[in-house]
Amino acid sequence: MLHYRQADLADIPRLQVIRAAVRENILSNPALVTVPDYEEHIRGPGRSWVGEEDGVILGFSSAHPGGRSIWALFVDPAHERRGIGRVLLDHAVAWLWTFSEVDAVQLTTAVGTRADNFYRAAGWSDTGRSRSGEVIFRLPRPGR
């Protein structure tokens, strides 16, 4: 049965495997995302969640209140299109809304990807391009 929980440090090796397995938004240099990066998004100040089934992590999301952003949202390609990403995104966004100073959440992703379409369908607004050419998405706090 699929369930969701907050990630812990022991999950990092599996998160790295999932991040490396994606078909889009592939890291040009995987060494740029380090174990301390994952730790910062598990122990704090960020937070991460995993979706798992039968003890196997199938996807994860990570948010950071300082950047008011979604740092990561990835699902094992073998388990895509099951709604796992949407639930994980909802966990991350809901946590960011617990910070009163967060009036909007942002993230970036590659142009023309499934992720680009996913965020548009979820109600995120395209607010321009980053220096690297990625789409900058923004989601305002409800009621603002």
Image (tube, helix red, strand yellow):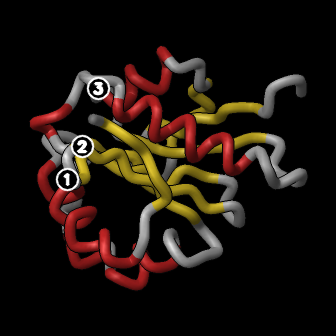
Kindly identify which residue carries mark 2: 53
Quadrant of the rendering where the N terminus is positioned: top left
Q: Is residue 9 above or below residue 121?
A: below
Callout 3: 10 Å neighbours few (<14), some, many (20+)?
some
Quadrant of the rendering where the C terminus is positioned: top right
User: Which of 120 and 21 lies nearest the eye of the viewer?
Assistant: 21
Kindly identify which residue carries mark 1: 56
Q: Is residue 68 left or right of residue 40?
A: right
User: Sequence-wise, which precedes: disc 3 or disc 2?
Assistant: 2
Type of amino acid under label 2: Glu
Callout 2: 10 Å neighbours few (<14), some, many (20+)?
few
User: Residue 133's quadrant in the figure?
Assistant: top left
Distance Cα–Cα, label 3 vs label 2: 24 Å
Q: Is residue 61 left or right of residue 125?
A: left
Residue 114, disc: 3
Q: Is residue 141 above or below residue 99?
A: above
Task: Please provide percent x and percent y for residue 110.
Answer: 34, 39
Task: Please provide percent x and percent y for residue 108.
Answer: 48, 44
Q: Secondary structure at mark 1?
A: strand
Q: Secondary structure at mark 3?
A: helix
Q: Is residue 132 left or right of residue 104?
A: left
Front: mark 3 or 2: 2
User: Which of 129 and 27 lies nearest the eye of the viewer?
Assistant: 27
Type of amino acid under label 3: Arg
Q: Are marks 2 and 1 in contact (CB under 8 Å)?
A: yes
Type of amino acid under label 1: Val
Q: Is residue 15 above or below residue 139?
A: below
